[in-house]
């Protein structure tokens, strides 16, 4: 039992971050906070990938003499791409928030909603 | 040398054109380049389909790395079909885009607009071509990110909130997909679709595989606007620039349907769908989606929103087809992917023409416009018939196969729901017809003229295609059937 | 912060160091951890620091927006162009082996070019994003 | 074109193959519609186009008929939208019968419509004539449809093409009526008929019309009744209750539309489809053996009586005629449901007999509307003395519908009655007889009132004259036809007999 909890601590971290981020996305009305939540959510996935690529006592996957165990580099490469995607999403999201702020004078979801309704 | 690389060029040509377009001065040059690129893509996609239509498979190894280690572009009939749809719609949309974009997009943004459009095309074509799940995720994000940008370029400020909403939901969906891919990768150590299918086969009962599958399906369902995850779609279609409504409505959800098919049946398998409640889930969501989205469409007061809800309903048909999980069901789904692209393309083009002339697609602005803009109106009318599934139109063919598949499955209820959905489509399409044709023309609209020819011609190309593919289904049905069989073969592999 | 002498001096000294590190990460990428993504971001950090200290106007004099846009596009073109070049030389897209008679050498050339393209694009894009946000007038 | 046809007609030279002729028959009205649209600015030319097209189509159909008598059974496939299922035209006796009725009456109605539309100062006449031509084209498509899929295709096109005709006036009332019209017709056809077609296809793998049906031996007889019901109700144009509401709703249309489409083309397309399905999909033997018609036949019987009763309560003449049509349509359905040769013969014959009679009645109703601007029966007292020809025609039509000699309507009722006797359905025979009495009760008072009644204020009409000449001509022709058909029913009789398989 303890093994399951401690031995898979990376998963617990991932799950915690994932839920925290997802909850933030769903529950917060503030557009910036939503994006922050989204980032946490995505980061948890990055962690998931990186931690599953780790081979215990492995080194960086560069061929050199004397090293035979090394971590799986593929998840890293994938996550590098995913991070770039995440950064682009964040940048785009924030840019939209700036524009929304300019157009509506607010970044609170309910206030924006009220303004649209009153039209 | 060129021939062996053509499949890849399909993705690389728009990819190369995008930065060049972004560097061009604003005006008509970016449009011209985009047009050229998309027509080239169409030619290549046509060639590609002609190669694989008989069941051949094109395999292209990126960087010369053999699969399953390297990224493989693996094109069978289904891939080529989807690629053809995407590039054909792009090629038809672009002549339409010229005037519409000049009207709706500020001049200083045109080159960026077209560059983003090309990136979106890269993403969609990439999804269609690739045989690697992670690569698919990347292309999905390329297309999604660019479509967020394109939607946000709409004239009204609500375009921004719509794009934001889509961005949040889309990113959550993509991340779900990423989690799913990660979990499956943990279990199998591969990302190549064919390889995944083989390696997953012995371990289909593993819990991790099931979890991964659930994440993948939910992730794609978000992109697919599968009921009840459709909330982003109506606003996104409504507030985006007309051209983008056309392009996204005709391609984006279709490509998502393709991803769903490829992942669920190609990577996992028909067996997996059967041993899990996936098929029932699809059927259930499909039934609710068809009925509720159609009913919602009836209550809309804006043509674009109405059509958007109709899209959700139509996507639900495709999900029903998947839920039937038979060759006939998948054939129906694929045929409908094609036909629905034709319908929604034409309908949104007509909407764009209305917006071009009266500046809005709300019902109260359209009173009596049918007489002022007869060509646009007739286009809406004929395509509406196709949407309903009147014989002699493409829509009838898809409806035919859906009901046939349902009957084969002995699901009377599903068959009835499909037909009932057509009935609801009659109601909402008729609303548009009545507004446009039978209401008196207000004085303010007396001077409204027919849309310019460059908008009408692409629209009518699609309208005629709607009729043509209602009579000649050699292309659609054959390809869909062969694609469905290939999927089935993959499913029962060894 | 233009008048804060300490910051100005330190920023001036830090700039080349950061840039140098960026180039190290960039060009050592095929022997050790690193590559275009990381290098691009680090390089843009140098410019961002510069902008923070000396102001947007000064920074935009060095790197005007249209130059950044061209740089970003060029990076993509280098990347895709390398792929097309390998195709023209008879290989598959991005099959570096064909870039040189010696496949190993080809791999080196290829990865260098690719990472260069990535680096240029990433740094240009990061700067564009940064400039876009800072340049936005407060309403 | 006309010359070629006449040459052809005289049998001296056959310049066109049977197939070409068949295609021309169906496609010419569509070409005519385009011609009408192009001549929209010049009414006289436009009407000339209409008449020429109608006359030519009529000749073509007669030509096809003559060739058919010589043993030509042309068939053309124009497309194959679904594997193994083509859009197919084929000539067979029932189709010829229907096509003959529709095309001759189109010509006559066109003559009538010109007078009516001008006399009534209707708007959008170009649209009217063009869609009229399209509707007739689709009707001929239905008549010559070579399989169930093609039949369905033309059936739906007919619905859609007639929608703007029903909504012609553009008023709220017209739009409401048109909505009911298209709503019920599309709903029944999509949900029930298409389902039935698909079930048939799933079971048999074919939708061909074949002598003796395609379902026998493939469908579990227990389910035959249900499938048959899907067809009968799905073919909403046959107006079997409870799916009859569209027909009264369609009466908001201009009278020529009501006359041709809602007494002849559209409704007859419905019962024609019922006959086709009965004969060529189910096959009479299969129906009788499986008992598919056991309970359905009472829907037809019930419709006959109920619609007649409702007709009596309607004061609006067109509405009364509409309910009368519903009742008469169920005669044909009844004939089909009897599934005996004589029943089918009576049903098929009734298509033509009722068509000529009912169109006369509608012509008269329209003429009254144009000339006297009256639509309620209770207002028509004494009107007959001012408009003797109109009311005379109405009387002839009424008598033919009732089924009295010497009018054509007698024959079809006779054979229908024989059919019920043959299958021992005495109750149904009494339904037919009661219905005839009801016909008398709701049709005759109109003419009686017209000729012998008094106006509301007791005066006589002085300012009201007969309807426009073209209306009168049309009426006279059709009422004469009613009489002639009593003495010379051979053409239709032979065709109907052939279709019913009694030869």
Image (cartoon, grey):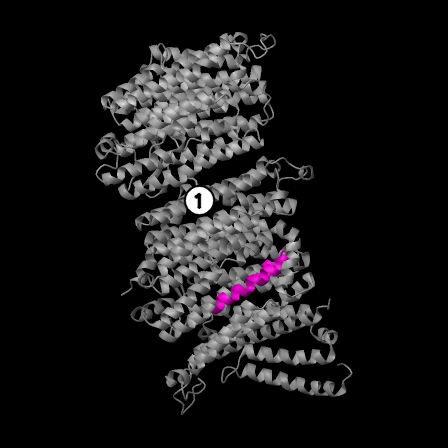
Q: Position of residue D288 (x, y in %)?
A: 23, 31
Relative to D81, say whether D244 is above or below. above
In the image, residue D310 lies in the stretch drawn in magenta: no
| Range drawn in magenta | B148-175
Q: Is mark 1 on a helix, strand or loop?
A: helix
Q: Residue at (42%, 14%) from the top-left corner?
A: D398
Magenta stretch, main secondary structure class: helix
In the image, is D282 to the left or to the right of D191?
A: left
Please tell me which residue lies in front, A68 or B27: A68
Q: Residues within 10 Å of mark 1 (few under 14, many from 20)?
A: many
Relative to D106, say whether B413 is above or below. below
The part of the image, by quadrant, that contains residue B235 is: bottom right
Please tell me which residue lies in front, C11 or B407: B407
Count the marks: how many?
Answer: 1
Q: Where is residue B100 in the image (x, y as percent from the top left)?
A: 62, 50
- Residue B44 visible in image: no
Chain under callout 1: B
């Amino acid at each position: 039992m303890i093994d399951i909890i401690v031995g898979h601590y990376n998963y617990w971290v991932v799950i915690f971050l994932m839920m925290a981020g997802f909850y933030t996305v769903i529950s917060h009305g503030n557009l910036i906070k939503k994006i922050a939540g989204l980032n946490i959510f995505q980061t948890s996935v990055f962690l998931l990938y990186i931690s599953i690529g780790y081979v215990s006592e492995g080194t960086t996957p560069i061929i050199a003499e004397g090293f035979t165990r090394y971590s799986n580099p593929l998840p890293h490469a994938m996550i590098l791409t995913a991070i770039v995607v995440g950064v682009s999403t964040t940048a785009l999201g924030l840019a939209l928030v700036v524009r929304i702020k300019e157009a509506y004078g607010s970044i609170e979801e309910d206030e924006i909603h009220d303004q649209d309704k009153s039209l | 040398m060129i021939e062996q690389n053509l499949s890849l060029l399909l993705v690389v040509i728009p990819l190369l054109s995008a930065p060049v377009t972004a560097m061009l001065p604003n005006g008509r040059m970016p449009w011209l380049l985009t047009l050229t690129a998309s027509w080239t893509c169409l030619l290549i996609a046509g060639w590609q389909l002609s190669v694989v239509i008989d069941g051949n498979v094109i395999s292209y190894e990126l960087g010369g790395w053999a699969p399953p280690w390297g990224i493989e572009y693996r094109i069978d009939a289904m891939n080529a079909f989807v690629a053809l749809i995407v590039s054909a719609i792009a090629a038809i949309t672009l002549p339409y885009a010229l005037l519409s974009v000049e009207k709706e997009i500020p001049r200083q943004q045109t080159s960026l607009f077209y560059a983003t459009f090309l990136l979106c095309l890269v993403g969609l074509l990439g999804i269609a071509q690739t045989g690697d799940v992670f690569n698919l995720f990347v292309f999905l994000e390329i297309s999604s990110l660019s479509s967020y940008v394109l939607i946000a370029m709409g004239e009204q400020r609500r375009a921004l909130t719509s794009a934001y909403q889509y961005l949040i939901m889309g990113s959550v969906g993509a991340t779900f997909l990423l989690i799913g891919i990660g979990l499956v990768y943990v279990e199998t150590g591969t990302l190549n679709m064919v390889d995944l299918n083989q390696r997953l086969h012995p371990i289909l009962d593993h819990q991790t595989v099931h979890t991964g599958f659930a994440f993948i399906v939910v992730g794609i369902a978000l992109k697919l606007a599968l009921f009840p995850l459709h909330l982003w779609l109506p606003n996104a279609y409504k507030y985006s620039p007309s051209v983008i409504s056309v392009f996204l409505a005709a391609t984006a959800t279709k490509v998502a349907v393709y991803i769903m098919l490829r992942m669920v049946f190609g990577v996992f398998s028909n067996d997996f769908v059967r041993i899990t409640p996936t098929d029932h889930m699809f059927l259930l969501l499909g039934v609710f989606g068809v009925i509720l989205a159609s009913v919602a469409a009836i209550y809309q007061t804006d043509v674009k929103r109405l059509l958007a809800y109709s899209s959700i309903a139509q996507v639900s048909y495709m999900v029903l087809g998947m839920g039937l999980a038979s060759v006939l069901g998948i054939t129906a789904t694929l045929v409908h992917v094609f036909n629905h692209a034709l319908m929604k393309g034409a309908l949104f083009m007509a909407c764009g023409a209305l917006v071009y002339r009266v500046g809005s697609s709300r019902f109260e602005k359209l009173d009596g416009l049918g007489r002022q803009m007869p060509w646009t109106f007739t286009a809406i009318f004929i395509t509406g018939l196709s949407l309903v599934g009147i014989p002699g139109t493409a829509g009838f063919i898809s409806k035919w196969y859906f009901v046939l598949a349902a009957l084969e499955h002995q699901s009377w209820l599903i068959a009835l729901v499909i037909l009932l959905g057509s009935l609801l489509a009659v109601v909402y399409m008729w609303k548009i017809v009545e507004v446009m044709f039978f209401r008196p023309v207000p004085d303010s609209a007396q001077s409204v003229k027919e849309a310019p020819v460059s908008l009408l011609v692409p629209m009518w190309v699609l309208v005629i295609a709607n009729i043509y593919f209602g009579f000649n289904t050699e292309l659609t049905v054959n390809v869909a059937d062969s694609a469905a069989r290939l999927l089935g073969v993959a499913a029962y592999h060894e | 912060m233009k008048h804060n002498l300490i910051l100005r001096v330190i920023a001036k000294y830090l700039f080349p160091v950061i840039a140098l590190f960026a180039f190290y990460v960039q060009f050592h990428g095929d022997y050790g951890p690193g590559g275009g993504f990381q290098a691009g971001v680090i390089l843009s950090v140098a410019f961002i620091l510069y902008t923070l200290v000396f102001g947007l106007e000064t920074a935009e004099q060095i790197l005007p927006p249209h130059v950044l846009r061209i740089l970003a596009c060029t990076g993509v073109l280098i990347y895709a162009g390398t792929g097309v070049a390998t195709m023209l030389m008879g290989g598959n897209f991005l099959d570096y082996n064909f870039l040189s008679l010696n496949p190993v050498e080809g791999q080196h050339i290829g990865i260098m070019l690719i990472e260069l393209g990535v680096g240029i694009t990433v740094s240009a894009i990061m700067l564009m994003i940064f400039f876009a946000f800072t340049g936005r007038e407060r309403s | 074109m006309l010359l070629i046809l006449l040459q052809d007609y005289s049998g001296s030279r056959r310049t066109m193959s049977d197939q070409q002729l068949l295609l021309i028959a169906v496609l010419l009205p569509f070409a005519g519609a385009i011609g009408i649209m192009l001549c929209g600015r010049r009414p006289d030319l436009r009407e000339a186009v209409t008449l020429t097209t109608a006359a030519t189509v009529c000749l073509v159909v007669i030509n096809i008929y003559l060739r058919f008598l010589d043993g030509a059974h042309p068939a053309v496939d124009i497309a194959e939208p679904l594997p193994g299922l083509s859009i197919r035209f084929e000539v067979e006796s029932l189709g010829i019968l229907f096509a003959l009725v529709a095309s001759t009456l189109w010509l006559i109605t066109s003559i009538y419509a010109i007078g009516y539309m001008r006399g009534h100062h209707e708007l959008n006449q170009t649209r009217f004539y063009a869609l009229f031509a399209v509707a007739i084209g689709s009707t001929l498509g239905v008549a010559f449809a070579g399989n169930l899929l093609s039949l369905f295709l033309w059936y739906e096109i007919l619905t859609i093409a007639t929608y703007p005709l029903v909504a012609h006036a553009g008023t709220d009332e017209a739009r409401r009526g048109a909505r009911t019209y298209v709503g019920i017709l599309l709903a029944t056809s999509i949900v029930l008929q298409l389902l039935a077609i698909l079930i048939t296809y799933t079971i048999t793998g074919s939708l061909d019309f074949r002598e003796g049906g395609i379902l026998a031996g493939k469908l579990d007889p227990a389910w035959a009744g249900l499938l048959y019901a899907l067809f009968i109700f799905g073919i909403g144009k046959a107006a079997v209750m409870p799916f009859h509401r569209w027909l009264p709703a369609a009466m908001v249309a201009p009278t020529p539309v009501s006359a041709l489409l809602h007494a002849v083309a559209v409704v007859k397309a419905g019962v024609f489809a019922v006959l086709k399905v009965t004969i060529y999909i189910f096959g009479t033997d299969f129906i009788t053996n499986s008992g598919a018609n056991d309970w359905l036949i009472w829907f037809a019987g019930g419709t006959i009586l109920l619609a007649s009763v409702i007709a009596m309560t309607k004061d609006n003449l067109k509405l009364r005629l509409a309910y009368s049509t519903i009742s008469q349509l169920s005669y044909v359905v009844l004939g089909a449901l009897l599934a005996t040769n004589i029943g089918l013969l009576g049903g098929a014959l009734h298509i033509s007999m009722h068509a000529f009679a009912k169109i006369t009645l509608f012509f008269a109703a329209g003429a009254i509307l144009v000339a006297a601007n009256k639509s309620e029966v209770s207002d028509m007292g004494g009107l007959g003395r001012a408009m003797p020809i109109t009311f005379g025609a109405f009387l002839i039509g009424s008598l033919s519908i009732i089924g009295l000699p010497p009018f054509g309507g007698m024959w079809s009722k006779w054979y229908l009655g024989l059919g019920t006797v043959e299958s021992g359905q005495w109750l149904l025979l009494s339904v037919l007889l009661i219905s005839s009495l009801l016909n008398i009760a709701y049709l005759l008072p109109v003419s009686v009132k017209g000729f012998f009644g008094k106006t509301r204020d007791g005066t006589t009409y002085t300012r009201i004259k007969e309807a426009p000449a073209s209306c009168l001509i049309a009426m006279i022709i059709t009422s004469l036809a009613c009489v002639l058909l009593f003495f010379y029913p051979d053409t239709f009789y032979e065709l109907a007999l052939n279709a019913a398989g009694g030869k």
